[in-house]
Image (cartoon, grey):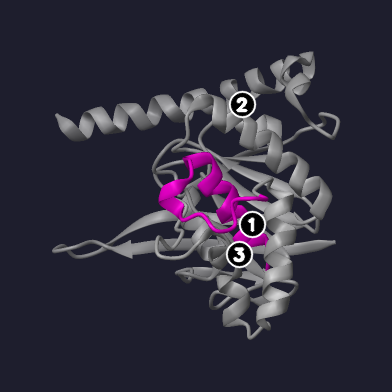
Amino acid sequence: MTQLQVEHVFKEFPLRNRRGSLRVLHDINLHIDAGELVVLLGPSGCGKSTLLNLVAGFIQPTRGRVTHDGQAVTCPDRRRTVVFQDYALFPWMTVQRNVEFGLKAQGVSAEERGRIAHEYLALVKLTGFEDRYPYEISGGMKQRAAIARALAPKPDILLMDEPFGALDAQTRVLLQEELARIVADMHCTVLFVTHSIEEAVFLADRVVVLGAHPGRIDSEHRVELPRPRNAGTRALPEFVTMTQRLWDSLKPTWQDTNERAIAAQI
């Protein structure tokens, strides 16, 4: 059943100190079914994060509409939670208090908040770190805490904006495997933004490739790799084949993006 629908969405931003506007997204049409993990893949500047922000309700489309279970998305909603690249944890709160933050805003009792926080910290393997502050834990652990905070309100849709982009390669791979496990356990819908082809193939049920200038959907690819996915998944011939297929699909877009960037500097 379709849970999220993006219909003929355009997004433009006014140009500073100049007339007119910059079109960032052009006629985006996308549907996501309940329980599906969809990855938005494309080069920097193709509008991936803008599309995610539209789905989150942080911004509104210039034209078209976004609906969640048939209702127009007009503002942020606890049924859609976001994990950002920079963790966005409150530095003055412990890990547990960070996880409880959204629940407290919903009026959940202290006892219930504590129970839920412990449940989700266990899910992301942070049991024993409840009383640590963000500066006392590693980047990978911060992102685990951010994922626990996003999951604690039991959202319908989890939105992830390059959540592993700032991590070292080994930690990134480990968290990809953890996310695959968590999503399988939770059966939640995920919209995930990345510019990493291997990350997209490892995580996705479906990869949506965006081109730039302005952002548009160039192609969609169903990923038929078996679940659960783990370290051995990357060695499968199907993984290698899909990675190459996506690279072939993206190569013209990346070349065009680089040529435009070079031309702009001349």
Residue 136 screen position, x and y as percent = 44, 47
Contact flag, marks 2 and 1 (Cβ < 8 Å): no
For disc 2, the marked residue is: 198
Residue 163 picture location, percent across and down: 53, 45
Residue that mark 1 sits on: 148
Magenta stretch contains residue 152 = yes
Amino acid type of the residue that numbered disc 2 sits on in the rendered structure: Glu
Q: Please tell me whether mark 3 or mark 1 is closer to you in this view.
A: 1
Identify the element where label 3 is drawn.
strand
Magenta-drawn stretch contains 264? no
**Residue 3 position by quadrant:** bottom right
Q: Quadrant of residue 116?
A: bottom right
Q: Is residue 99 left or right of residue 53?
A: right
Q: Nearer the viewer, mark 3 or mark 2?
A: 3
Q: Amino acid at mark 1?
A: Ala
Near mark 1 (Cα within 10 A), the count class, few <14, some 14-19 or many ≥20, is many
132 or 24, nearer to the observer: 132
Residue nearer the viewer, 223 or 102: 102
Q: Say what amino acid the circle numbered 3 marks.
A: Thr
Q: What is the CA distance from the residue labelled 3 to the residue labelled 1?
A: 11 Å
Magenta span covers which residues?
A: 127-154
